[in-house]
Image (cartoon, grey):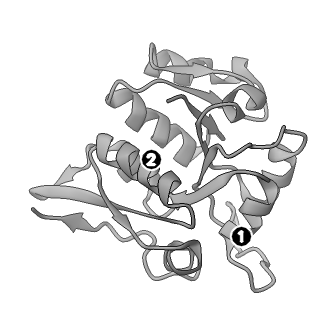
Amino acid sequence: MSIGIIGAGNIGSAFARALARNGISATIANSRGPETLAELTAELAPHIMAGTIEEAAGADIVLIAVPWSKLPAALSGLPDWAGRIVIDANNAIEAPLFKPAELGGRLSSEIVAGLVPGARLVKAFNHLLANLVSADPKAEGGNRVLFYSGDDQQAKAEVGALITRLGFAGIDLGPLATGGSLTQFPGGPLPAINFVKFG
């Protein structure tokens, strides 16, 4: 199963590091072009390769972590997602001001879903600080918790299996309407808390 990453900021890079640590290959892309990712791919060789957004978007599972205001431009003009899995790791907030985006009463994942027509969307990897995504998930004698949610059971099962392969304790929070609101940042109660599961 191929993996793509759109966005090479804190979360995208942390996800790439977690994959590389576990010997899993992926293609990572940003808006500035593959050549700007030479330092990151040198660090994570041979598992992580740089590519175009189109190449990353063609993978079976695609994690998207892009500054909120740049999401529409980053995802515009791509072919229909044709049932492929999108991991929504985005938060509706941006440095340096960290002012919440205006969502018009919708969940951020609903907005992201509208930008990836035909995809099966799973919300995950947005609620942990980047350094905890890339760090060894074995912690305090247990495993660091990673929440995920979505409306497609098979897509969630595949993302859950990847989360387990990375060493996290995956916890399914149910459909997007439930889990997406619990892990949404800002607003949800679960982001930026480092939960550990024992046993």
* Residue 139 in the image, given as x and y percentages of width and height: 18, 54
Amino acid beneath label 2: Glu
Amino acid beneath label 1: Glu
Task: Name the quadrant containing residue 181.
Answer: bottom right
Would you call the spot at circle 2 few (<14 residues within 10 Å), some (14-19), or many (20 or more)?
some
Which of the two discs, 2 and 1, sits closer to the camera? 2
Observer-nearest residue: 196 or 56?
56
Task: Name the quadrant containing residue 41.
Answer: top right
Q: With respect to residue 184, does 63 lie above or below?
A: above
* Residue 114 in the image, given as x and y percentages of width and height: 80, 62
* Residue 6 in the image, given as x and y percentages of width and height: 67, 39
Regarding residue 98, the answer to whether it shows in the image is no
Residue on which the image places disc 2: 158
The residue at the point 53 percent across, 73 percent down is 175
Q: Residue furthest bottom?
A: 105
* Residue 183 in the image, given as x and y percentages of width and height: 50, 73
Observer-nearest residue: 23 or 100?
23
Quick check: 70 left or right of 29?
right
Observer-nearest residue: 163 or 37?
163
Observer-nearest residue: 72 or 110?
110
The residue at the point 42 percent across, 69 percent down is 192
The residue at the point 81 percent across, 83 percent down is 104
SS label for mark 2: helix
Q: With respect to residue 126, does 99 lie above or below?
A: below
Residue on which the image places disc 1: 110
Quick check: 57 left or right of 177?
right
Would you call the spot at circle 1 few (<14 residues within 10 Å), some (14-19), or many (20 or more)?
some
